[in-house]
Amino acid sequence: ERSYHHHHHRITGTINLQYLPRGMETFLAGDNRMSGTLELADLPPSMRQLGLSMNSFSGTLSLVDLPERLQFLSLCGNAFNGTVNLTQLPDGMESLYIGENSFEGTVDLTKLPPS
């Protein structure tokens, strides 16, 4: 299956993105109780939409080396911290939601994707 949609199901535990099926295009599991850190560089190259908002993920968030096909990324309402680099997002990125975290520092908005 290329899609996974499970919102509001009280799913707990951690997730290792490297074990998602290589052909997966959509993974939406917002408003659950998942935690731990996320290694977004481990996403399948086919991934177009990732939604993990309103969970309890923490640590720093690297937005470098995302799949080139990724268009939608929603990670708001977690506990990410540190600085965030928006200078190397995929060219096709259309929607990025990372609010309601604990980021700090200055954000470079000069190299956002054209779309």
Image: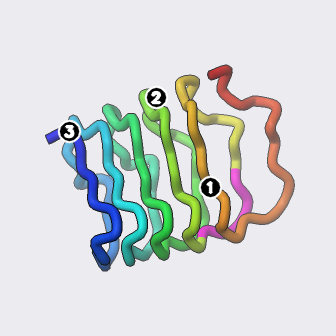
Q: Which mark is residue 98?
A: 1
Over which residues does the magenta segment extend?
Answer: 80-84
Q: Please identify the quarter of the rendering in which residue 112 is found.
A: top right
The kind of residue tagged 2 is Glu
Task: Name the residue at 55% across, 70% down.
Answer: 78
Task: Name the residue at 75% across, 30% down.
Answer: 111
The reply to whether the magenta stretch includes residue 52 is no
Q: Which badge, 2 or 1, is on the more N-terminal residue?
A: 2
Q: As drawn, is 50 to the left or to the right of 109?
A: left
Q: Please identify the quarter of the rendering in which residue 11 is found.
A: bottom left
Q: Which badge, 3 or 2, is on the more N-terminal residue?
A: 3
Q: Which badge, 1 or 3, is on the more N-terminal residue?
A: 3
Q: Position of residue 15 (x, y in %)?
A: 32, 66
Q: Which mark is residue 77?
A: none
Kindly report which numbered mark, 3 or 2, lies closer to the viewer in this rendering.
3
Q: Position of residue 65 (x, y in %)?
A: 51, 40
Is label 2 in a helix, a strand or a loop? loop
Residue at mark 2 to residue at mark 1: CA–CA distance: 19 Å
Residue at mark 3 to residue at mark 2: CA–CA distance: 17 Å
Task: Kindly identify which residue carries mark 2.
Answer: 68
Magenta: main secondary structure: strand
Within-10-Å neighbours for mark 3: few <14, some 14–19, many 20+: few
The kind of residue tagged 1 is Ile
Within-10-Å neighbours for mark 2: few <14, some 14–19, many 20+: some
Q: As drawn, is 4 to the left or to the right of 60?
A: left
The reply to whether the C-beta atoms of the residues labelled 2 and 1 are less than 8 Å apart is no
Task: Kindly identify which residue carries mark 3.
Answer: 2
